[in-house]
Image (spheres, helix red, strand yellow):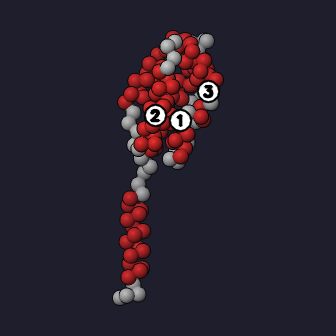
Amino acid sequence: MVRRFPTVVAVVLAGALTACGGPNPATHFCDDYGKAVGKLYTAAANYAAAPAEFAAIADETMADLSRLRAPDEELGRALDSARFALTVFSEDATLADFLARTDYAQDDVVKECAEHGVELKPAEG
């Protein structure tokens, strides 16, 4: 019986790790963020041709971001930073210009999602 103990412990431990290793809690949050902000980046690139569309998407994005809840502290800090960055511009044109010149991959939430194993890419425009 003593010789079987390590085997039994290893099997029980492996089963427990498998049961606890469910889906990545960051996946849903990151996907929702990526969809909302990806649309905004795409609209920013097209601001000159469709400023009203950009304004509507910016409003929708801010509403979406206000409903998002980060699953952990690191993603929460990144989300707060991203929200702040989107609210410092008083005019749509300046926000669109900023986003059009910004590398999506450098977005705080995009970088933190990558750290959590979730890769986000900008929306196709």
Give the structural element (helix, strand or loop) at label 3: loop
Residue 113: where, in percent of width, then height?
Answer: 51, 42
Task: Decide: few, some or many residues near mark 2? Use Cα within 10 Å; few <14, some 14-19, many ≥20.
Answer: many
**How far apart in space, not on screen, are marks 2 and 3 (Cα)?**
17 Å
Quarter of image, res 21: bottom left
Residue marked by disc 1: 108
Residue marked by disc 2: 79
**How far apart in space, not on screen, are marks 2 and 1 (Cα)?**
7 Å
N-term-proximal mark, 1 vs 3: 3
Amino acid type of disc 1?
Asp
Q: Residue at x 41, y 44 (%)?
A: 72
Amino acid type of disc 2?
Leu
Quarter of image, res 44: top right
Q: From the image, which quarter does the C terminus lie in?
A: top right
N-term-proximal mark, 2 vs 1: 2
Residue marked by disc 3: 102
Residue 65: where, in percent of width, then height?
Answer: 42, 28
